[in-house]
Amino acid sequence: MNQLKKRIAIYPGTFDPITNGHLDIVKRAVCLFDHIVVAVSDNLRKKPLFNLQERKKMAEDAIQAIKYVEVMTFEGLLVQFAHEMQASAIIRGIRAVSDFEYEFQMALMNRKLDPKLETVYLMPSEEYTYLNSTLVKEIARLGGRLDCFLPSLVVAMLSEKFTEKKP
């Protein structure tokens, strides 16, 4: 009997915090792969508002209703993590042409490091094309409405972070 290999993809990111746009990409990826690993990373070049465990908690809460998806943290090279997870692909979201240049460079570097690992670009629904974590943190800092951009736990945790920072 011929056993089909499970198609596993990694969706990496800082997810500081995870947004409805990220979730849109996860839902699209589930249609293409058997299993998705949302890989929350500690990017040394970024200074996240939330620590790694908080970001993992928010992502786990946000994806709990989506089958065949799990959240993990990782450090180091993405291609090494993908190899450990036996993944065949990396999922990346592309919102605009401005995202493409950076993503293209990363895909080529990852391909050089592991020629068997593919990068799959997914476009979010148009309602999320402008959405990113930096913008929602700014909206939160200024006291704006967040529920249309973020899962409810993320709204609560983000609001709490900015309440803590006020004198």
Image (spheres, rainbow, N blue to C red):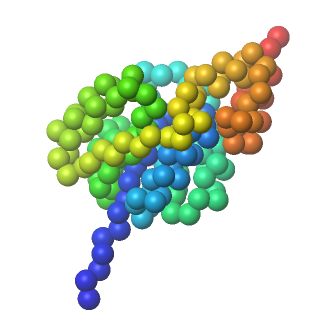
Compared with residue 24, is residue 145 higher up or lower down, i.e. above or below? above
Instruction: List the single residue furthest toward the top.
Output: 167
Question: Which residue occupies 40% across, 49% down?
Answer: 10
Compared with residue 26, is residue 163 higher up or lower down, i.e. above or below? above
Question: Does residue 73 appear in this view?
Answer: no
| Quadrant the N terminus occupies | bottom left
| Quadrant the C terminus occupies | top right
Question: Which residue occupies 53% across, 53% down?
Answer: 27
Picture quarter containing residue 20? top right
- Residue 67: percent from left, percent from top: 56, 63
- Residue 143: percent from left, percent from top: 78, 20
Picture quarter containing residue 111? top left
Q: Nearer the viewer, residue 162 or 35?
A: 35
- Residue 16: percent from left, percent from top: 57, 31
Question: Which residue occupies 30% across, 70% down?
Answer: 5
Instruction: List the single residue furthest toward the bottom.
Output: 1
Task: Please state if 26 lies on the left or on the right of 84 as rendered.
Answer: right
- Residue 31: percent from left, percent from top: 46, 60
Compared with residue 26, is residue 43 higher up or lower down, i.e. above or below? above
Task: Please state if 58 lies on the left or on the right of 30 as rendered.
Answer: right
